[in-house]
Amino acid sequence: MTAENLIVKKRDKQKLNENEIRFLVNGFISGEVTDYQMAALLMAIYFNGMTFEETCLLTQTMIESGERVNLDHLNQFPIDKHSTGGVGDKVSIVLAPLVATADVAVPMMSGRGLGHSGGTLDKLEAIPGFRTDLSLKEFVSLLEKNAVAMIGQTHEIVPADQKIYALRDSTGTVPSIPLIVASILSKKIAEGAKALVLDVKTGKGAFFREYNQSLELAKAIITTADKFNVKTSALMTAMDQPLGFAVGNWLETREAILALQGQGPKDLIEITLALGAEMLIQAGVSYDHGEAHKTLTDSLSNGRALEKFIRIVELQGGDVSVVEDPDRYPRSRHHLSIRSNRTGFVHSIDALKIGLLSRDLGAGRRRMSDDIDYSAGIVLQKKQGDQVEKGESLAQIYYSSNLESETIKEKFFEAVEILSTPNQIKPLILKHLSRHDSGDWDEN
Ligand code: URA
């Protein structure tokens, strides 16, 4: 068997078997399969796809490339959430502590932001001292103490994914459904989650803009997860405008803290409660959505969710004082208020363009190695459908770089459209998707 023969096989639309997939993945880790051979294979997979069986084998091989956490000894059922990412998506920061107040465990392993899209790790690390680079031993110990831990991918977990993802990122092979499925699921399974709830976003600021592609991804993850006995369901949610008002690391963490105090923006709370309720049902601690919603809203209003978050921050080395008093946080050097140039209704706020503006302000990265400015970003004051008067404030912009204010305004107005008549607001949660034991889809 040679890498070259197997690349040719995939190029010619043939199926790879278990030994061949193992040979390629393990050979890539050991260096026997070169970067250029793996890049060619990834491109062949990008164009020709993988069968369900191949995707499962790839997932299994990737899991086996590192350690697998066993959480059987926990008193609570371990369940995680995965979002396909977007702009202003600070859901995990609210959801993880919130759900962990309801007698389930949340072993959460998140990622960093890249391009227009933010990452939970960066938002958490905006809290001075907050450590996300914990060892697996520390991860398990936190789960035992506090039922929740929020960390980054360690080198112990799925090293094959780290190496393959870096190559995908620089070879245009990220948007391949089988590669995404194996990448996401290998990490979730290796971290010890026994069930999973997906937030699959669709629209302008989403990984896949097209609804049908997003749905295909959700179905592929659910079907593959089933094979590994990780019960998974998904919410398909709209990502046309940013979620909540804040975009940028500390600004989003501050908004998440407000949400944990029961004062979060309506859209953020709607998605958080829907995903949280789904998690409680999957974990078997709630019987229906009504009961689960009540458990979660009680936790937001009685302070338990915030208390849980403060404990996470404390245990992971973060400065609790900025959580308790967000106004203590260091401010960016510049602050710009953007005012509307006309009277009307906010017709659209392009999530992709706002995400890119936030990145340009210093909040995001062009390359994974770039530094980020935690205090930079945008706080919207109007959302889609809101009425606005000429001269009224639309957003506050925070940055420390030398960007010209005129350039910022220009980019902002490329993202925001104001028309004289109101438009129909689309629902935020587009679909709930799960699979019966029979294999039939439940879509509502
Ligand atoms: N997130 C991941 O972890 N992997 C992918 O392939 C895409 C998004």
Image (spheres, helix red, strand yellow):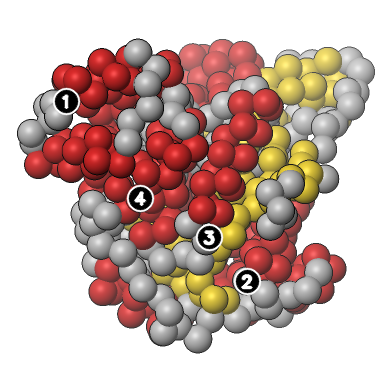
**Quadrant in the picture for the N terminus:** top left
Q: Which residue is painted at 68% across and 77% down in the image?
A: 285
Separation of residues labelled 2 and 4 (CA atoms) = 24 Å
Which of the 4 image quadrants contains residue 12? top left
Q: Secondary structure at mark 1?
A: helix
Image coordinates for residue 58, horizontal then vertical, percent: 35, 41
Q: Is residue 33 above or below residue 343?
A: below
Separation of residues labelled 4 and 3 (CA atoms) = 13 Å
Residue 230 - label: 3
Image coordinates for residue 137, horizontal then vertical, percent: 26, 74
Residue 283 - label: 2
Determine whether, in the image, residue 316 is placed left or right of residue 392.
left
Separation of residues labelled 3 and 2 (CA atoms) = 11 Å
Q: Answer with mark 1 or mark 2, whichever residue precedes in sequence.
A: 1
- Furthest toward the right, the residue is 421
Q: Nearer the viewer, mark 3 or mark 2?
A: 3
**315 or 60: which is nearer to us?**
60
**Residue that numbered label 1 is attached to:** 3
Q: Residues within 10 Å of mark 4 (few under 14, many from 20)?
A: many
Separation of residues labelled 1 and 4 (CA atoms) = 19 Å
Q: Tell me which amino acid carries mark 2.
A: Ala
Contact (CB < 8 A) between labels 1 and 4? no
Image coordinates for residue 188, horizontal then vertical, percent: 43, 56
Q: Answer with mark 4 or mark 3, whichever residue precedes in sequence.
A: 4
Separation of residues labelled 1 and 3 (CA atoms) = 32 Å
Q: Answer with mark 1 or mark 3, whichever residue precedes in sequence.
A: 1
Q: Nearer the viewer, mark 2 or mark 4?
A: 4
Q: Tell me which amino acid carries mark 3.
A: Val
Q: Answer with mark 2 or mark 4, whichever residue precedes in sequence.
A: 4
Q: Secondary structure at mark 2?
A: loop
Q: Tell me which amino acid carries mark 4.
A: Gln
